[in-house]
Image: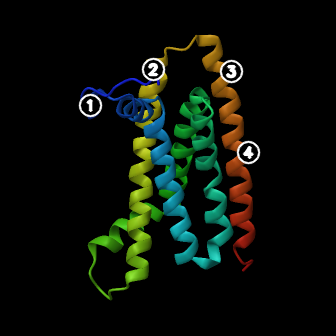
Amino acid sequence: MNRQEITEFSPSGSSMHTRGMAALLKPGRDVAMLASIQILCFLALTRLEPRFFIIHLYQVIPYVAIMLLVGYGRERWAYMIGPLVSLVWLGLAYIAGLLGSAMERLRSFERPSRETDFVAVLAVVTAVVALLMIVLCRIHWVKQNLERGEAWRTFLVSLTIVVAYYAILLRWFWDMIPNA
């Protein structure tokens, strides 16, 4: 037989080890990981706040898109959509008082309720992940050093997508509020 003889065992020198490490170091994996954390948080909120099930499920869509964009090698779009979605979500959460009430809920120890405490923790976690998403996407964008013409086109298309996405979300949320 024409088989290579194994003369020594070196796990650090094996091709399996280097391929595994290279997969972890591919660009955008950290952004995809943050997107998956956001997905898990919003899916947990669908269980905790059943009356907002559709809203929380809808909030998962851009983060699934970010994971798909990274997976298919379209990081430039993920690096532009990620911070825009996160920035708008942080703005809406702040305007709605969600972040302030979550921090207040976590500071006060009156009437302990695990469900509302967990919702407050998830709100804070999603805010922290959104901030990390903004920072990491900007770092990756600068590292790629893309051409200015291409960057503006990517920004404008991404901004249009994010504005349309949040317009639909706000419309659904507005329709959920009972008319007084």
Identify the secondary structure beneath mark 4: helix
Label whose residue precedes the other's in the sequence (3 or 2): 2
Horizontally, residue 7 falls left or right of residue 121, namely left
Q: Between tags 1 and 4, which lies in front?
A: 1
Mark seen at residue 99: none
Mark seen at residue 153: 3
Rendering coords of residue 90 (x, y %): 49, 50
Which residue appears at 51% of the width and 43% of the height?
Answer: 87
Res 146 quadrant in image = top right
Rendering coords of residue 44 (x, y %): 51, 69
Mark seen at residue 12: 1
Rendering coords of residue 75 (x, y %): 56, 29
- Residue tagged 2: 142
Horizontally, residue 42 falls left or right of residue 179, namely left
Label whose residue precedes the other's in the sequence (1 or 2): 1
Could you give the CA–CA distance between mark 4 and mark 3, rounded to whole angstroms? 17 Å
